[in-house]
Amino acid sequence: MQLSPLAYDRYVAPARLRPQLWRLVLGVGVLMAVYFLWMGVMAGAIAFVRGGVGLDRALGTIGLGDSPGSLILLLLTFLGMAFGAFAAVRWLHHRPVASLFGPRALVLRDFGLGFGLFMLVALPGVLWFFLTLDLTRGVAWAVWFLFLPLAIGGLLIQTGAEEIVFRGYMQQQLAARFAARWVALVLPSVLFGLVHYAPAEMGGSTWWIVGVTGFFGFLMADLTMRSGNIGMAWGLHFANNMLAILLFTTGEALDGLALYRLPFAASDTEVLLPMIALDMLGMGLVWALCRLALRGR
């Protein structure tokens, strides 16, 4: 399978104008500052609407996304992550925000392709869950449908923001700075895994989940390199999170709009490890199909 360097070179080219590492490090700082500022704005707005409650209580409203409203608010916090990446590329690298995405037509096409292939591979697993696991009901159908448009919009924001940061900003800037391709593939993927570190919810499974998340990030980075845009990674990420947040959850967090709860917790390592192995096999199959679809570009 041949790599098309032209598409990736075009994708990385805007970052090569100002590839200095100090700009990237400072850019990550700007990104985090804007993200936390946005969190403060959201908390302030919630406090105002609720009649002047404290900011800590307002942030607690967002919490773990364990109700429909708090889940939507939690997903909207990722707007700050996207705004932070936009600020970094404009202020420090002096390049267009659109350069984080790649060509618009390719982004839209590859998003649809990635989403469709993921759902195709995931369908047998979804059916297997229904047929073999003792699932319990989550939210009522009426509530689910009522919040579904907002949830889809929130998931597009959340997954898009993470792709913009990790497969867009960081991968582009590292690819522009280092000739070795592995640097731009591995470092953002490791960071992507680490930002999902949540021992309070995951218990003894924490590092396994961090590892499989980093593995997912690496596959998304490779597809971004092959396609020259974030569309395919975004579509796969969106499809994955739709199933993990709106259909099946383990109940510890992000379960405010889940239709079903799995009969085990994320911290139940003994039960979770076979699931993680199957998940990695499924991700590898989706990745292979996506690579096949990209052949010849």
Image (cartoon, helix red, strand yellow):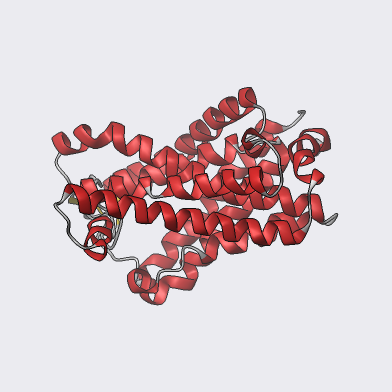
Location of residue 146 (image quadrant): top left
Look at the picture and state if 235 lies above or below 16: above
Corner quadrant of residue 257: top left
Confirm whether residue 228 shows in the render.
Answer: yes
**Left or right: where 108 falls relative to 145:** right
For residue 23, which quarter of the picture? Answer: bottom right
Q: Is residue 35 left or right of residue 56?
A: right
Vertical side of 290 occupied by 269: above or below:
below
- Above or below: residue 42 compared with residue 98: below
Q: Position of residue 21 (x, y in %)?
A: 75, 60
Q: How many marks?
A: 0
Q: Is residue 108 above or below residue 58?
A: above
Residue drawn at x 66%, y 53% is 170
- Residue placed furthest toward the bottom: 204
Residue drawn at (54%, 31%), measured in percent from left and top?
Answer: 111
Position of residue 284 measured from the top left corner of the image (x, y, whole percent): 59, 49
Q: Position of residue 109 (x, y in %)?
A: 58, 25
Question: In the rendered image, which quarter contains the N terminus?
Answer: top right
Quarter in which the C terminus is drawn:
top right
123, 214: nearer the viewer = 214
